[in-house]
Image: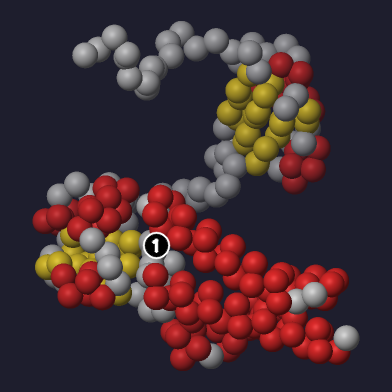
Amino acid sequence: MPEDFFQAILYSTIVFVLLIAMARIIGKKLLAQMTFFDFVIGITIGTIGGAFVTTEVRGFYVLLSPIVLTLLVVLTGYITLKSVPARKLLEGEPMIIIQNGKIFENNMKKIRYHLDDLLMQLREKGVFDLSEVEFALLEPHGKLSVLKKSQKLPVTPGDLGISTGYKGVSSEIIRDGKIVEQNLRQNNLSHEWLFNELSNVNVKKIEDVFLATLSTDGKLYVDLRRDKPGYIQEVEDDDSVI
């Protein structure tokens, strides 16, 4: 009985270490950027690891495996929080892909990051012209951070010396036909004020409101349950077009 107990701990730890090692070898890719092949291989590796534990450990001791794996994840998170070298070893470091407008092909080869990945992630950042990029770094979790060249950056009010007002998070005042009383009180507003605002936009009943939010400048946005837009934009392809 004690032997099965220690086997459950040992085999779970072995599987955990192997999965971390293989994940580091496979490289930096977000789940959304994984190809079908990457996805199948990842599922297969996890399935084989789980099958190994369930085959080698007998009886209810196999239930120790998820407990051990959870504890190892927590322990790993604590170690990476306290130790920079451990964080670099387990999670990796950012990799420079573009510097001063030049692509680092050798760095891309090291992590098996091809040009299509780079172009796709640049487009996701709104960059369709490589000449606009000053720096691009691939983060440990696979996300691409991009700094455009200074002449390509949008002008901000701060650049023009223009002062702006505070803009924070809007408060939900009505949600799914019901008043959010807490948010109404936090903004020092009354039901009378709310009804007057709704009346100004020709809303008669609270139940008709799907969502109403209050911006930091005091403006109330109202969306009705069954409102009918005058025009609906079609985004699907027309099958009749050849």
Residue 237 appears anywhere in the view: yes
Q: Quadrant of residue 108?
A: bottom left
For the C terminus, the image quarter is top left
SS at mark 1?
Answer: loop
Amino acid on which disc 1 is placed:
Lys
Q: What percent of the width, then of the height, locates residue 126?
A: 27, 47
Viewer-closest of 66 and 206: 66
Relative to residue 88, is residue 183 drawn left or right? Answer: right
For residue 215, above or below residue 204: below
Residue drawn where x is 81% and y is 89% of the image: 3
Residue picked out by circle 1? 29
Q: How many marks?
A: 1
Viewer-closest of 139 and 50: 50
Residue drawn where x is 48% and y is 79% of the image: 21
Q: What percent of the width, then of the height, locates residue 156?
A: 30, 52
Residue drawn where x is 67% and y is 24% of the image: 210
Q: Quadrant of residue 150?
A: bottom left
Relative to residue 163, is residue 241 drawn left or right? Answer: left
Q: What percent of the width, then of the height, locates residue 144?
A: 33, 61
For the N terminus, the image quarter is bottom right
Residue 150 appears anywhere in the view: no
* 10 Å crowding of disc 1: few (<14), some (14-19), many (20+): many
